[in-house]
Image (cartoon, rainbow, N blue to C red):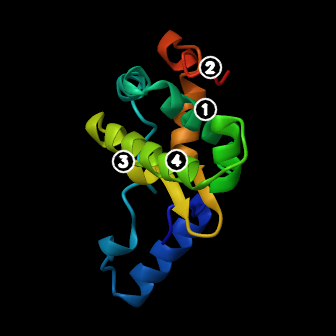
Amino acid sequence: MSSSMSLSKVREVLANSIRDEGFTLKYSQISSTEFSDHIPIQSLTALVSNLSGKEKVFFNILYRKKGEFISRMDLSKLIWEKDPNNSTLAQLSQIVGRVKRKMQSTGIDSSLIKTHWKKGYALHSSLYESIEMHKDDRTIQKLAVL
């Protein structure tokens, strides 16, 4: 199973697992983010409060993409408002690492920022939806994404 599976696909895999394994559910096939509830507002506000300026810009760009991937080159261009170079790409890697560490420290699974070798980065749908659900919160609005 993958973290981007629809509920109907998850049901299908589970039904096949139950049928094929004699009612033995293979927990290892299910990632923790597939059945997770929305992220609590306290975790989101703690994350937003801890992000630096460039980290907020990075997170804001991912949010505005609504779960679609954005390339490292495009991210770099948007964050620094100039053509990407080795320095900005290295700084981008540092930003991604810091944001993921801050997510972990606030109780948010860092894999909710998806990384794809050829495509770039994207927010997992559950993180995007959690932000949408709490977009009226003042701290969340500090992301300047709304």
Instruction: Tell me which amino acid carries mark 2.
Output: Ala
Select label 3 or label 2 by which is in front: 2
In this view, the residue in front, 89 or 71, is 89
How far apart are the two marked residues, 3 and 2, measured between alpha carbons?
22 Å
Q: How dense is the environment of label 1, judged by Cα within 10 Å: few (below 14), some, or many (20 and up)?
A: some
SS class, disc 1: helix
Mark 4 or 2: the one toward you: 4
Q: Nearer the viewer, residue 122 or 96?
A: 96
The residue sitting at 71% across, 35% down in the picture is 81
Measure the C-alpha gap from mark 4 to mark 1: 14 Å
Classify mark 2: residues with Cα within 10 Å, few (<14), some (14-19) or many (20+).
Answer: few
Q: Quadrant of residue 106?
A: top left
Mark 4 secondary-structure assignment = helix
Q: Mark 4 or 3 closer to N-term?
A: 4
Residue 6 lies, in percent from the top left, at: 60, 60
Instruction: Compare marks 2 and 1 and give the one earlier in the sequence.
Output: 1
Secondary structure beneath label 2: loop
Which residue does the numbered mark 4 point to in the structure image? 92
Circles 2 and 1 in contact, beta carbons < 8 Å: yes
**Amino acid type of the residue tagged 4 in the rendering:** Leu
- Which residue: 46% across, 37% down? 38
Gap between marks 4 and 3 measured at Cα: 20 Å
- Label number found at residue 109: 3
Left or right? Give the position of 36 relative to 146: left
Does residue 112 lie above or below 2 as drawn? above
Q: Which dot marks residue 144?
A: 2
Q: Position of residue 48 (x, y in %)?
A: 44, 24
